[in-house]
Amino acid sequence: MAREVNTDGAGRTGQRRRRPTAADVARTAGLSRATVSYVLNDTPHQVIPERTRQRVFAAAAELGYSPSVAARALRSGRSDVVLLLLPDWPIGPTVGQLLEELSTALAEHGLTFVAHPRSAGRPVSDVWKAITPAAVVTFEELDDIETKKLQAAGIELTVALFGGLRGPRAMDIPEQRTGRLQAEHLAIAGHRHLGYAWPDDPRVLTFAEPRLAGVRQACADLGLAEPHVLTVPLTPNGAAEAVRAWQAAEPAVTGICAYNDEVALAVLAGARQHGIDVPGDIAVVGADNIPAAAIAIPPLTTVQPDMQALSDYIADTIVRKLNGRPSPKRPGSDIHSVIRRDSA
């Protein structure tokens, strides 16, 4: 006969530990289930003596009791979970910091943050139905069918779009500002012919396109020529070919705006391979201020986004939607700043 194996560490074979319930807490505390329910659910308009409340909390801690998320959702009519459907992005330091800051910002509003990659292969509806979230956040538009399913289920949908407002559910996050600051910094330093180091990873187009648009607009506003755009792979040889092409252009490119710091570091490696001095012969500006930027040779000038301000904006937008309030004002241009180092 098959025998169930205990997996809860209780030390007994054949028995699985039952999850403690509110009724167990009531028995341990020697109180009515109603009183325990009032305390655990923080029911309004119920006057419970502090001593009684502490008895309930002590009993709950002793038993290892935690309230059921599903039951709480049924009582309140709303889950406290915010589901982020993460696109197929490389999870580097910048995206990782955004997720960390967003989790903290939502927690301050009593919301639980869950991230799930859309590239995992499951239909979107399968994911949100499994956890019944209060809101779903995406960084790209969902199709009309998925959107209607969410609306029918009463789940708020918020779309965070980098670089432009494109729908009634979208938040406008001004990513073009990154490229503009790169170009302006190089122009102030006297560079009149700029290049743009485009990434060879198609997954990051969400960020790359508005950043390049910012560089182009800044060049137009400053009376500079259109930036010379070249794809820069994350290899020394590939980056060296791009650097050599910029140097051989007529007129030669003397300032490079890189899609991000990783691409900028590749440009630095390519310049070293050809013995090209940075910033003497060519200046380089990255974006995102990853930890490696400060210890590059030379240390990398970069544009840094204020991740806390960005995450606070996304969290505030979600909370306002859940409470039926208007969306907050989008972040201004001051959420991006230039970190000046030796490469430009």
Image: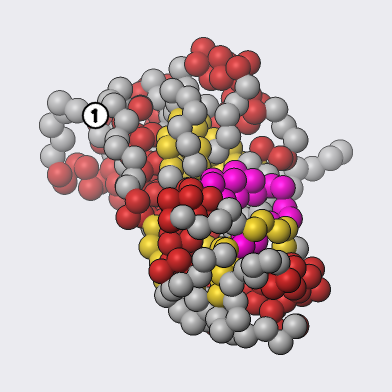
Give whichever of 268, 34 is nearer the camera: 268
Give whichever of 71, 116 is nearer the camera: 116
Q: Residue 178: percent from the left, percent from the top? A: 47, 55
The answer, for residue 81, to whether it is visible in the render is no
Q: Assess disc 1: are there few (<14), some (14-19) or many (≥20) residues with their C-alpha within 10 Å of its C-alpha.
A: few
Residue at x 43% of width, y 42% of height: 173
Q: Secondary structure at mark 1?
A: loop
Instruction: Find the residue positioned furthest to the front.
Output: 250
Give whichever of 21, 210 is nearer the camera: 210
Q: Residue 294: percent from the left, percent from the top? A: 51, 79
For residue 285, side relative to residue 55 (left or right):
right
Relative to 329, say whether 338 is above or below: below
Q: Residue 228: percent from the left, percent from the top? A: 65, 58
Task: Tell me the quarter of the picture where residue 130 sits.
Answer: top right
Give whichever of 91, 171 is nearer the camera: 171
Q: Is residue 207 magenta?
A: yes
The residue that label 1 is drawn on is 43
Considering the whole magenta stretch, tell me its main secondary structure. helix
Question: Considering the image in quadrants, where does the N terminus appear?
Answer: top right
**Amino acid carrying mark 1 in the image:** Thr
Residue at x 75% of width, y 63% of height: 233
Residue at x 43% of width, y 56% of height: 222
* Region of the chain picked out in magenta, as a range: 195-214
Residue at x 65% of width, y 70% of height: 252
For residue 281, side relative to residue 153 (left or right):
right
Q: Is residue 80 magenta?
A: no
Q: Residue 263: percent from the left, percent from the top? A: 65, 65
Relative to 149, say whether 139 is above or below: below
Relative to 163, say whether 293 is above or below: below
The answer, for residue 327, to whether it is visible in the render is yes
